[in-house]
């Protein structure tokens, strides 16, 4: 049993359907056949019952009729006075021949089959059926006996094994009884035929002979002997009929092997005793024949239907299950890690829906896998803000600004060694944070010396800002201040391995120059090579500085020197990190944006342990911290100390949180809390370990296609969620998209986000543009109000950069970029493998339309297009 | 049916009379026509007809001493038709083994002899001229006709229907032709008449065919037939 059960379970679905269908059909046909068989038999029997009932009725009717006729005849005969007189005279002289002659004559006229004239005691005077029967005493015959008592009688007469309907009437003269006249009609085949005509069944008349029933007349003489035999076999029937005088119905007879149904009705004499019986019988087989035809037709059609259905179910199961099988195979492969199956998604039914969902799932898995592979690759080089040893995978030769730094204070190494090293570590932490917050990369740290590099857009101001920040860490004029130098030029970077493990190396002319500059630097000095100075010329000039080159004691090259103040002021004049337009006059004069005095290692309130500097924005710095209360890592955004007093800033911070908190979406960086600790306002946000899109773009020319698609979709999803909450981002750029190791992108830094509704035309103060020009829509650059389509424009630039590797508009100055944004059409995007998918290209270009009304009206439109693309 | 023996005595009688007086002859032919007058009647025996002439001045008749006889034999009256002078006697013997009844209800000649078995039977004298119908009250097929005539001139035709009357006085008179199946045919004529008289009688009381059953067989259980044809 177990085996069969298991085997059954393991059968393919197609076979199961097939078997089930077959079973159903078999059951249906079987049931139909069974039901019809039973019904048919019942109907046939009923029909026969009715026929036989009719036979019985007809028989009775005919008998009555004959009886009446006989009676009439007899009475007429008996009422003829001449006849009576004749009989009387003859009887008186025992002259039976005269009476016999008269009877015979009358028989000819009237047609009865026999006649008897009896005297008043019942003795025969003359009888036509036995000319010599005169003198016989018939007083005991029931008919005669009855007529002797009742003067008239009727009943069935049996004589010599033949049956007659007979009557007896008195012959009388005046009122005296002379005798009786008896006459009868024989019960013959003709009588049987008469009954049959009316009722439709076969009819036979039987008597109980000595050795069994005898058929004396019937409609089917050929069957007579067989019928007699069958009746004899049915002992009980004949017994019941003859002895008890009861009618027996539904007698089953077998005549020549065929089934017949009969009803046997007794024929009674005048005394009420059965002397014979009327047998009405009908062929069950014949009755059933016509119904059998129906039944056969039913079976035949059932079989045909069965065969057809079997074929059909087979074909259907096949057709239905083929795609299911395909899906099963694909699912199995996916389970093994193979997501590259092609799924047929053309069907319209539930199976098609399943296929489509499965396809989407596979696509998602594919992209995620690609992203994971990609990010896993790169995540090996995730910059740990606290660490200063990123190991980059490939050797590169590039043009860099290099920053050299010496911590002069450690020239003396007295004191507790542990404390010294601790101090060293914390100094490096802070300095490293300052460097990475300006997107610099610490190349090497050796003892009290540090080497960092800056490249990419705005490297000069950034390097300058980083230097200024570092200087700002120490109070002015301290003899323990570090000395810094900046140089620029071509260099080679990359990993080298000359001992266990890999090291980073940075070699080149600028490094040499640094060396010489640092010789010259005093504590708190920042020295610049001429090239760097020239690069920063615009920045310096706009700060109102005109530096004169100096000649050093040890170096022949001229250099320029800045002290902390100057440096700070310079960086304060224009923004850092790309080109940021600082806030209005207020910031210009009073604020010297340095770090708010919070540095890695410090404890904010009793709650937050500052672990590292993650970055800096126009409003403040972002730290990685540990929230002791929540016992979780968070990102803390603080306002710069200088801005604390500014109520508008604080209000902006608060409103930012209110907005940001509304947005909950896996692709939006979650905002946790707002507070003030030690009078310093902060926002705590979700800490995410990952790289910014900027970092990825810097590392590789362009992302792999599927990774890029995934990012794009997630960006749209997150932005869509923000827009749905009525919040604009307004500062979408690669720096604001962080990508976790698992490949999820989160949109962050809704730093200058504004609720869409609250924007009323003209509220943006004149001359105060918010955003990054590279990513700003033309209408926003021109001072008009931003809306969702401005965000979409920025997304367009981002997509362009993701899929081609560089932005559509670039220039050496921000103004140049702005002008191009406003006026120029973007060039056709070319990916690393040639032209992009036409749908993608069209979508990107649509985002970049100068006229906002031509762009996607909402992020959802763009999202839909991206959804339709396949990696 | 009508045996030769019946016509014999009749003819003899006529010849006797004719010898007594010389007279005129009258010849004629009787035809029995089928109903409607078209064609000869089938199954009708013309010999059963009676023809008599009554002169305007009646001639006397003489009744013989010996009675005539009508016997019941095989359930029939034989002779079936008898012409007798008025005042003659007829005896009715029964030669059958069964009881018979003889009666008549014909006016002045009515009589009923009741039931009597085989034997000489009874005799009756018939004085009133006219037709006497004789029956048996149980045997409905038995019938006899007795013409009691007031004229000596009568005859029965032969098988061909011809008849001859002789010794007729000259002068006017009435000729009557009678057959049981037709209406009596009479003609006034004056003797002598040349040629033959053609008497055409239409059979208005045809013989009823005997009962037969469905198969055409006669109902008669014994072999005897009542009427031929």
Image (cartoon, rainbow, N blue to C red):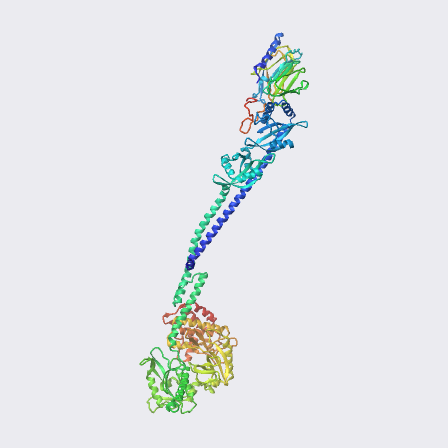
Q: Is residue A854 left or right of residue A59?
A: left
Which is more toward the observer, A50 or B131? A50
Q: How many marks?
A: 0
Image quarter of residue A395: bottom left
x then y, percent, for residue A629: 49, 80
Image quarter of residue A694: bottom left
Which is more toward the observer, A579 or A5? A5
Q: Is residue A610 above or below residue B10?
A: below
Residue A828 appears in the picture as rendered: no
x then y, percent, for residue A309: 44, 53
x then y, percent, for residue A859: 47, 71
Residue A414 appears in the picture as rendered: yes
Which is more toward the observer, B17 or A553? B17
Q: Is residue A829 above or below residue B130?
A: below
Name the residue at 48% across, 44% down: A293
x then y, percent, for residue A666: 46, 73
The N terminus of chain A sits in image quarter: bottom left
Image quarter of residue A390: bottom left
Q: Is residue A171 left or right of residue A627?
A: right
Q: Is residue A183 left or right of residue A474?
A: right
The C terminus of chain A sits in image quarter: bottom left
Which is more toward the observer, A214 or A776? A214
């Amino acid at each position: 049993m177990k085996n069969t059960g298991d085997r059954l379970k393991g059968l393919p679905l197609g076979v199961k359907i097939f078997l089930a269908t077959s079973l159903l059909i078999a059951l249906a046909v079987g049931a139909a056949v069974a039901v019809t068989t039973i019904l048919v038999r019942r109907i046939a029997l009923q029909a026969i019952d009715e026929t036989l009932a009719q036979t019985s009725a007809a028989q009775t009717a005919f008998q009555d009729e004959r009886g009446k006729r006989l009676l009439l005849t007899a009475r007429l005969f008996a009422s003829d006075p001449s006849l009576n007189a004749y009989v009387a005279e003859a009887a008186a002289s025992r002259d039976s021949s005269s009476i016999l002659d008269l009877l015979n004559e009358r028989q000819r006229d009237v047609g009865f089959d026999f006649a008897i004239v009896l005297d008043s005691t019942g003795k025969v005077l003359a009888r036509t059926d036995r000319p010599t029967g005169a003198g016989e005493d018939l007083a005991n015959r029931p008919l005669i006996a009855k007529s002797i008592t009742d003067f008239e009688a009727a009943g069935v007469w049996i004589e010599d094994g033949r049956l007659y309907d007979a009557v007896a009437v008195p012959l009388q003269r005046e009122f005296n009884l002379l005798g009786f006249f008896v006459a009868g009609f024989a019960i013959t085949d003709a009588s049987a035929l008469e009954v049959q005509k009316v009722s439709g069944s076969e009819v036979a008349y039987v008597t109980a002979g000595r050795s069994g029933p005898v058929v004396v007349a019937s409609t089917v003489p050929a069957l007579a002997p067989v019928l007699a035999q069958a009746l004899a076999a049915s002992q009980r029937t004949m017994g019941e009929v003859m002895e008890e005088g009861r009618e027996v119905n539904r007698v089953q007879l077998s005549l020549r092997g065929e089934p017949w149904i009969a009803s046997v009705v007794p024929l009674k004499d005048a005394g009420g005793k059965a002397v014979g019986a009327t047998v009405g019988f009908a062929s069950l087989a014949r009755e059933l024949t016509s119904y059998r035809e129906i039944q056969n037709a039913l079976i035949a059609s059932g079989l045909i239907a069965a065969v057809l259905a079997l074929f059909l179910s087979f074909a259907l199961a096949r057709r239905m299950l083929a795609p299911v099988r395909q899906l099963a195979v694909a699912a199995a492969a996916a389970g093994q890690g193979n997501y590259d199956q092609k799924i047929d998604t053309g069907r319209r039914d539930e199976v098609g829906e399943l296929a489509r969902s499965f396809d989407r799932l596979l696509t998602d898995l594919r992209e995620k896998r690609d992203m994971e592979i990609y990010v896993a690759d790169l995540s090996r080089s995730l910059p740990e803000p606290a660490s200063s040893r990123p190991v980059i995978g490939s050797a590169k030769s590039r043009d860099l600004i290099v920053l050299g730094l010496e911590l002069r204070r450690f020239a003396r190494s007295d004191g507790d060694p542990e404390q010294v090293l601790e101090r060293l570590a914390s100094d490096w932490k802070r300095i490293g944070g300052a460097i990475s917050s300006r997107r610099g990369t610490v190349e090497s740290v050796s003892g009290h010396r540090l080497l960092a590099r800056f490249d990419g857009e705005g490297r000069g101001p950034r390097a300058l800002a980083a230097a200024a920040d570092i200087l700002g860490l120490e109070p002015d004029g301290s003899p323990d201040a570090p000395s810094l130098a900046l140089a620029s030029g071509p260099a080679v970077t990359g990993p080298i391995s000359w001992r266990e493990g890999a090291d980073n190396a940075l070699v080149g002319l600028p490094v040499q120059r640094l060396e010489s500059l640092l010789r010259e630097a005093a504590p708190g000095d920042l020295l610049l090579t001429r090239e760097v100075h020239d690069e920063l010329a615009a920045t310096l000039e706009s700060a109102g500085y005109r530096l004169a080159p100096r000649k050093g004691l040890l170096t022949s090259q001229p250099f320029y020197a800045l002290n902390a103040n100057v440096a700070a002021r310079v960086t304060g004049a224009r923004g850092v990190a790309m080109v940021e337009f600082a806030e209005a006059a207020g910031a210009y004069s009073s604020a010297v944006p340095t770090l708010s005095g919070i540095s890695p290692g410090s404890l904010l309130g009793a709650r937050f342990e500052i672990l590292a500097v993650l970055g800096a924005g126009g409003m403040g710095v972002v730290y990685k911290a540990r929230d002791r209360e929540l016992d979780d890592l968070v990102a803390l955004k603080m306002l710069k100390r200088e801005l604390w007093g500014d109520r508008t800033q604080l209000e902006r911070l608060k409103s930012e949180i209110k907005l940001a908190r509304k947005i909950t979406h896996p692709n939006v960086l979650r905002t946790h809390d707002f507070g003030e600790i030690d009078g310093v306002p902060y926002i705590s946000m979700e800490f995410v370990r990952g790289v910014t899109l900027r970092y990825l773009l810097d590392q590789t020319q362009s992302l792999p296609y599927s990774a890029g698609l995934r990012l794009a979709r997630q960006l749209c999803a997150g932005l869509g969620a923000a827009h749905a909450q009525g919040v604009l981002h307004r500062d979408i750029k690669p720096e604001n998209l962080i990508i976790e190791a698992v490949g999820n992108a989160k949109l962050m830094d809704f730093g200058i986000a504004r609720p869409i509704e609250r924007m009323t035309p003209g509220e943006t103060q004149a001359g105060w543009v918010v955003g990054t020009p590279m990513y700003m829509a033309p209408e926003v650059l021109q001072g008009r109000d931003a809306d969702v389509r401005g965000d979409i424009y920025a997304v367009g630039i981002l997509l362009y950069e993701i899929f081609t590797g560089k932005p559509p508009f670039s220039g050496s100055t921000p103004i140049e970029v702005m002008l191009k944004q406003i006026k120029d059409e973007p060039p056709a995007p070319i990916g690393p493998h040639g032209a992009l998918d036409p749908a993608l290209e069209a979508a990107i270009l649509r985002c970049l339309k100068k006229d906002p009304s031509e762009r996607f009206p909402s992020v959802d439109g763009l999202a839909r297009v991206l959804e339709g693309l396949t990696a | 049916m009508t045996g030769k023996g019946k016509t014999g005595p009749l003819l003899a009688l006529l010849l006797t009379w004719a010898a007594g007086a010389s007279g005129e002859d009258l010849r004629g032919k009787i035809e029995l026509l089928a109903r409607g007058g078209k064609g000869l009647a089938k199954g009708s025996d013309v010999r059963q007809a009676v023809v008599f002439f009554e002169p305007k001045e009646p001639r006397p008749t003489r009744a013989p001493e010996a009675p005539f006889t009508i016997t019941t034999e095989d359930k029939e009256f034989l002779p079936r038709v008898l012409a007798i002078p008025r005042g003659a006697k007829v005896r009715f013997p029964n030669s059958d083994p069964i009881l018979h009844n003889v009666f008549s209800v014909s006016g002045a000649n009515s009589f009923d002899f009741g039931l009597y078995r085989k034997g000489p039977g009874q005799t009756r004298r018939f004085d009133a001229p006219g037709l006497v119908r004789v029956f048996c009250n149980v045997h409905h097929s038995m019938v006899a006709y007795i013409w009691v005539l007031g004229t000596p001139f009568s005859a029965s035709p032969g098988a061909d229907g011809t008849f001859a009357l002789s010794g007729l006085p000259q002068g006017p008179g009435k000729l009557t032709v009678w057959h049981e199946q037709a209406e009596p045919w009479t003609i006034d004529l004056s003797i002598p008449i040349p040629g033959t008289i053609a008497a055409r009688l239409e059979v208005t009381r045809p013989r009823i065919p005997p009962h037969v059953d469905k198969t055409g067989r006669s109902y008669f259980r014994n072999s005897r037939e009542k009427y031929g044809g």
